[in-house]
Amino acid sequence: MNQVFASRWKALLWSAGVLMTAYCSVPSREETEAAKDQPAIVLPDLPELPAQPPGPGFQD
């Protein structure tokens, strides 16, 4: 780090890179709101499952 901050210009370029990384890594408000409206995953249609598991003598 001593070489980065050896001059003011290098320090400015380094800080500009940090700020650009932060700016590019945060999603925009529109992307965040659009992601809230969509489900995380879509499952295929599953058959109805029984409310309780079958008893101990159940065989398929």
Image (cartoon, rainbow, N blue to C red):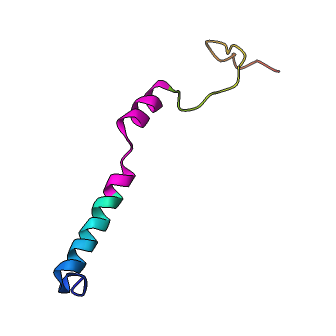
Q: Does residue 27 appear to the left or right of 8 in the view shown?
A: right
Residue occupying image coordinates x 39% and y 44%: 27
Q: Does residue 28 appear to the left or right of 49 in the view shown?
A: left
Q: Main secondary structure of the magenta part?
A: helix
Image coordinates of residue 55 in percent, x first then y, are 69, 16
Image coordinates of residue 50 in percent, x first then y, are 66, 13
Nearer to me, 60 or 5: 5
Q: Does residue 20 appear to the left or right of 12 in the view shown?
A: right
Q: Does the magenta stretch include residue 56?
A: no
In the rendered view, tell whether residue 7 sits above or below residue 54. Answer: below
Q: Give the range drawn in magenta.
A: 22-37
Q: How many marks?
A: 0
Quarter of image, res 4 = bottom left
Image coordinates of residue 59 in percent, x first then y, are 81, 20
In the rendered view, tell whether residue 56 sits above or below residue 33. Answer: above
- Quadrant where the image shows the C terminus: top right
Q: Does the magenta stretch include residue 36?
A: yes
Residue occupying image coordinates x 21% and y 76%: 11
Q: Does residue 35 appear to the left or right of 47 in the view shown?
A: left
Image coordinates of residue 26 in percent, x first then y, are 36, 48
- Quadrant where the image shows the N terminus: bottom left
In the rendered view, tell whether residue 23 sits above or below residue 52. Answer: below
Nearer to me, 26 or 52: 26
Nearer to me, 13 or 38: 13
Residue occupying image coordinates x 24% and y 79%: 10
